[in-house]
Amino acid sequence: MIDNSGTTKDISAKVFDDLFRNIDHLPMATAILSNSGQTVEHVNKAFLALFRHDLLHVSYSPDRSMYSYLNHPIVQQTINKAYQSGEAVKKERVQITIARATGDENKYLDLHATPILDHNNSPTSGILLTIIDTTRTVEFQKQFGESERSYRNLMETMAVAVYTCDMEGRVNFHNDAAVTLWGRKPELGVELWCGSHKMYTLDGSWMPHDQCPAAVSLKERRAVKAEALVQRPDGKMRHVLVFPRPEYDIHGNIIGLINAVVDITDRKTLERQKDDFMAIVAHELKTPITSIKGYAQVLAMQLSDLGNEEVNQVQRRMEGQINNLINLIEKMLNAARIESGELQFKKEKFDLTLLMNEVVQDVQLSAKAHRLIFTPTTSVFAVGDKAYTAQVIINLLSNAIKYSPKADQVIISIKQENEHSICSIQDFGFGISSDQKSTIFEKYYRVKTENVNRPPGVGLGLYLSAEIIRQMGGAIWVESEINKGSIFSFSLPALARQ
Ligand code: ADP
């Protein structure tokens, strides 16, 4: 039992003097004990404040009942151990309930019991006990643990596969959906980057795990969005969309990676079925519509002899609609061909300015409400397939006209910049919101709008244009502002490579 009589035993008055002076202003609660740690000689202000902080005035002759806290079994054990071993003993997170005027208060304390040495550095029977109040830290850790637990529970119940890696890329957590997707359970803390058996790129080439999107994201410290194929141990393939991104601590240091893996196999299968269906329909329509065009041309020749302007006008409209149908069918067929790799692109140097002039003149013939303005000053060349480049220009010009019904002009420009030639087509129409600027190049994508009078279309023109330009080694992009208009641009290599 701690005796609080305050009597010194075998420690010299000089040692106590020194200690008393030194501990009084220490920020942590400190007590000097003598008599093998059983007698309280002195406590500092922080000790009084810790155990009686409800006292307004902390005095040097405190209510000695507070010493009873030193009788707590763990405090006693710590003191005894330090005395018996002659070594400093540390005990962390000791839970002690302190009685306050306002009610009981639970505290977490770190205890440090250190044997007091005399002037010859020999142990005495005295113990210096320091107590650090870690209640706030412990409570914060508990709250943190709880929020981490609910965060993990949330991840566990998610239908999307989610996993995390440490900063070396070792998988350290995954949810059940990830196991379902991978068809296996990775060894946590051992396997790197991703828990799947094998990964492939969309063209079917094997992707080593250290080159997978998650590895790239962590190594290059950036968020990545990519599509890939995951192979399960039983050989089955899943088509996935992955979103790995690095995780940072509050100081901005990378602490690991989180990756969400969305299984889009079923969506891709449906898309493929839709594509196949479209391709069959387009193919079946192509022969009769080409015949209809032929018959219409024969009729046109016969009718023009009659000299009836009204009939001739109807005939011209019919031919215009037949051409629209043929264009649509061509787009549907090309979309199918581009995906199966059937479209072959020539790689020849051609005069882009000349081509633009020809296409602009052609399109101007049917664009009654818009003036297509193209005033080139020099010849710009490009390398690629001239016919497909013409198709891209037609698509962009038709869109510029179609999506600016109230405007009366479209401005076209061409320039060469370093190793690329760039064409830009500017309209003054509806414009495109920034969140839809990248999605308009996706297949079948049409801008969402409240406008019931929006021009009809199937969302294939920009997709095809982007694929054609990409396959010819160029890029396509749009700058736009809602209700002000858009500038669609594409680049092509300007120089033939050896
Ligand atoms: P379609 O015109 O057949 O719908 P596209 O692939 O050519 O298909 O275009 C996709 C979408 O992008 C269109 O539905 C349209 O909303 C938008 N868009 C294309 N060009 C323009 C433009 N110049 N101005 C505004 N919106 C455009």
Image (tube, rainbow, N blue to C red):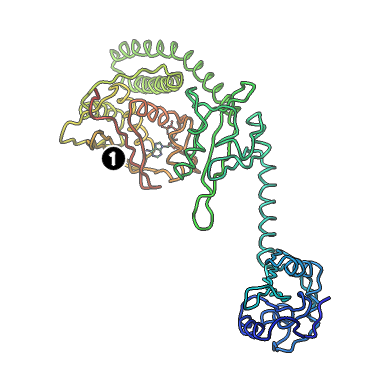
- Measured from the top left, where is residue 191 in percent x and y? 59, 35
Q: Label 1 amino acid? A: Gln
Q: What residue does disc 1 label?
A: 409
Which of 395 and 194 lies nearest the eye of the viewer? Answer: 194
Q: Quadrant of the N terminus?
A: bottom right
- Looking at the image, is 239 positioned above or below residue 489? above
In which quadrant of the rendered view does residue 257 lie? top right
Determine the quadrant in which ligand 1 lies. top left
- Residue lying at the far front of the rendered structure: 120
- Measured from the top left, where is residue 172 in percent x and y? 62, 42
Residue 210 in sight here: yes
Q: Is residue 233 left or right of residue 225?
A: right
- Measured from the top left, where is residue 80 in percent x and y? 77, 69
- Measured from the top left, where is residue 462 in percent x and y? 40, 31
Which of 130 and 292 lies nearest the eye of the viewer? Answer: 130
In which quadrant of the rendered view does residue 410 lie? top left
Query: Which residue is at a point 66% across and 79% down the rendered structure image?
Result: 46
Query: Which residue is at a point 28% across and 40% down the rendered structure image?
Result: 409
- Residue lying at the far right of the rendered structure: 1
In which quadrant of the rendered view does residue 376 lie? top left
